[in-house]
Image (cartoon, rainbow, N blue to C red):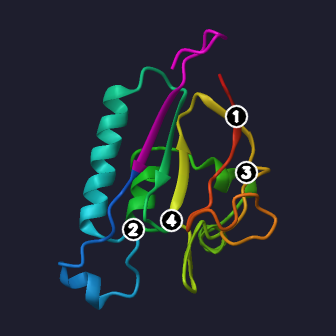
Amino acid sequence: MHRPTGKNLDIFNTHLSLPSAFRPEFWTKKQRMGFGANQLEEARALQTFVERERKCDGFVVTGDFNSLGGSPVYRYLTEDAKLADPFVTHHKFDTKQLNEFATAGFMNLRMRLDHMFSGPGIDWKGFEDTYPVHDVQSRFRGLSDHMPLIGTFEVR
């Protein structure tokens, strides 16, 4: 998207699959969300797409990754693909704290599945209107089983 300021911004939204229930490790391992081989392959395809299609360093990749912080999918995106997680940086969260800030809830389950990543051309300012799922302060409470991640930023 070309902005009136003359700065470009590319936005990518995704929704990765759930881990494949047809693989033995789905049934034998405790952690699942973001640990599926199919999910890791989708993350690689997403990164290839972003690299091919982005027009500048000012880009955001966001959505339902169906992946916990610290999972192989999350680590691939932040370490191998070198995408920044501005929410973690802003709050100075470690993996445990990140996963405790649940963005999705179903029945009694609470999980951090939604993420916002960015390239080096974005300066993040804050996340003032972002709340964990089912937080009574959120104006989005009860509208979905996921809470939106809302951040403010400037394009360099």
Q: Amino acid at mark 1?
A: Phe
Residue 94 is drawn in which quadrant? bottom right
Up-down relation of residue 66 to residue 100 (above or below): above
Image point 75% across, 70% down: which residue? 135
Sequence-wise, which precedes: disc 4 or disc 3? 3
For the residue labelled by badge 2, is the local secondary structure a helix, a strand or a loop? loop
Provide the residue span drawn in magenta. Answer: 1-14
Sequence-wise, which precedes: disc 1 or disc 2? 2
Point out residue 63 in the picture as x, y percentages from the top left corner: 48, 51
Label 3 to label 1: alpha-carbon separation: 12 Å
Residue tagged 3: 90
Sequence-wise, which precedes: disc 2 or disc 4? 2
For the residue labelled by badge 4, is the local secondary structure a helix, a strand or a loop? loop
Point out residue 114 in the picture as x, y percentages from the top left corner: 53, 59
Residue tagged 1: 153
Q: Which mark is residue 113?
A: 4
Tell me: 9 left or right of 5.
left
Dot in front, 2 or 4: 4
